[in-house]
Amino acid sequence: MKFAYVFLFCLSTFGVYGFGFSSDTTALKGLEFPCNTDSCVLKNAWDLAIQLPRGEVDKSFKYASILSNIGQKNHDTLSVVRSYIIHGNINLVTLSRYDSVKYYAQKGLSVIDTSLGSSELARLYNLFGIGILYEGRELESLDYFKKSQRIYENLEDYCQMATMTHNIAKLYKSFGNEEETARHIKDAIATKTTFDCQDNISYMYLNLCAFYETENQIDSTIKYAKLTLLEDKAHNSESEIGPAFMFLAKAYNKLNVLDSANLYIDKSIRVAKLHENIKLKSYAYLNKSQIIAQENIDSAMLFIHQALQFARPNSALLADIIEHKSSLLKQQGKYKASLELMEEANSIRDSLNGVVEYGEMKSKEAEESAARIHKLEKESILLNSKSNRNQLILLAVIILISLVSLYFFIRFKRWKKMKEEQLVNIERTKEIALSKSQMEMLRSQMNPHFIFNSLNSIKSFFIRNDQQAAIDYLSEFSVLIRKVLENSSKEMIPLSDNIQWIKHYCALENKRLGNSLHYTVNYDLTADFSSILIPPMLIQPFVENAIWHGLSKKTKGERRLEINYIDSESNYIICEIDDNGVGFPKDSLSPKSSHISLGTRITDERLQAIRTFYDEAFTYTILHKKDQGKEGTKVVLKLPKLKKDQFID
């Protein structure tokens, strides 16, 4: 993912890591309270914990131990819940251990009274939402964030409500819902301003600035970058100054106001050096290179080398830097070296597998805090282990007996059904084996067919003596063919991968047609196409037919191609391929017709094998648009929503 919008799901209050117990005397050592009764100590421990700065992990851990020890002794559920909250927060803020964040949130939710709607419940919902977010469960995370937001609203804690509104905005950004993203960030800022909540306003301005930068709304980018600087200055904070300067530089570079762009990017570099912010240094040097590349490629190359020094290995940022260096080499006429770097950048992006980097690099102080926490945790667990040993042994025995009983019960059920299923399985296995071998043979025929057509396109550029176009086409073709070869051994691929591949293929064909092809690929951004599987190279032959046999032969008027992926309410995905090309005679709709391309014939045979193998109805319909008084052809494919758990290996 290209870096523009910063996602940092961190609480602005407190936190400690680990879960352990120590004696009251040990926990209270070094801490002073104005009282010595249990109720007073518990209240003071909680009040002090939520006011501690982020780096005070040792004290936070001791406060959590006090709450847990005294709470368990007095059967005070609220105090125990508060200790879980502290443990969850330190895992979030200091260590970024999201599995532990989820663990402690679950512990708290298992004992708290959810009907009361307390601030503690709101904190647990927020922690649990963050924990499952990093497991890729975005929709569930959004639900828990909204629950937390509603509780804070009912409690009239509008500052915390605004913080949750901001977290929700960042989730909408990950869904691609730009309208909801902007609305929620603005609501959060308005609430913080109305109720004089001074925490995190500059950070929200910076996120809004980043949002508008990705939307290419330059005036709004400049506006919110400057508001970030003003807010930081008003509160003597410098945490967002460097990124704000960088966004100003990028905005003025887009406006071609190079003096201002250079001024702000130099300020961003100085801030990065002053605070030893390695990641900001790398981004700033990259943007500096992009700005001065218009005037001096040699100087731009020097800055790109500096950016490479600070970029983290195998990161999206490193891929962006290498891609920019590739473009500089291309401008210098070093096409071979440029192509090699572009392939390296694409290789890095492939290795990331779409993983989004959440948060900033952890500082040396955070690592030292983590080490201290681990030490305290081990000591506490050792003290508590003896008292819990008997309970653990009893629990282990109960679990063991249950598992053994479940094992024999399942085995008995399987044995009972085995005889009935054997005959059915034998016949089904024979049928599937035959269909699978047919699919593999037909799938292997599709790749040479696609490569042959693409090589014809490259050949046409050389015939026209357009070497530069051929090189550009070959560079993009190498990316496309790598994906084809990767998928050649796969029976199924995610539908989301297919959509991206079709976009790339259309762009490649558009180059061959001299950018005369007006194409669109439409799909629902909120639909989960990554969990739906389809055979590779299934849709491409129909798109190829539309371009090669319909649109390429069109000599008059605009060449238009529209590809729609529709997530219907049924168990099917509808794919429409609609062109305004020359069309073809009605008799060519027959599979026996000589007009049908080799790719379409192979696809017909693959679909027949797939229907047998998966017992699902993959169908398509070709509509002759001349019957409606229109130009072109429309193909409608009906694809079953095959999930990963349905896939037969």
Image: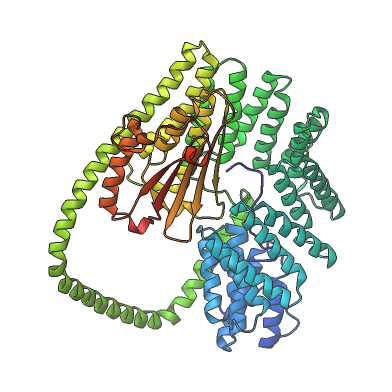
Where does residue 439 sit, x and y in percent of width and height?
27, 42
Left or right, 278 with reference to 546: right
The quadrant holding residue 226 is top right
Question: Depth check: 584 or 408 in front?
Answer: 584
Residue at point 53% right, 66% down?
Answer: 102
Identify the coloring: rainbow
Count up the numbered dots.
0
Left or right, 36 with reference to 27: right
Where does residue 101 sit, x and y in percent of width and height?
55, 65
Q: Is residue 90 above or below residue 254?
A: below
Q: Is residue 26 visible?
A: no
Q: Is residue 282 above or below residue 109?
A: above
Left or right, 412 with reference to 151: left
Residue at point 72% right, 68% down?
Answer: 161
Q: Quadrant of the N terminus?
A: top right
Where does residue 237 sit, x and y in percent of width and height?
80, 52
Question: Depth check: 80 or 587 in front?
Answer: 587
Question: Depth check: 51 or 387 in front?
Answer: 51
Q: Is residue 531 visible?
A: yes
Where does residue 412 sit, x and y in percent of width and height?
18, 75
Question: Depth check: 157 or 488 in front?
Answer: 488
Residue at point 50% right, 48% down?
Answer: 565
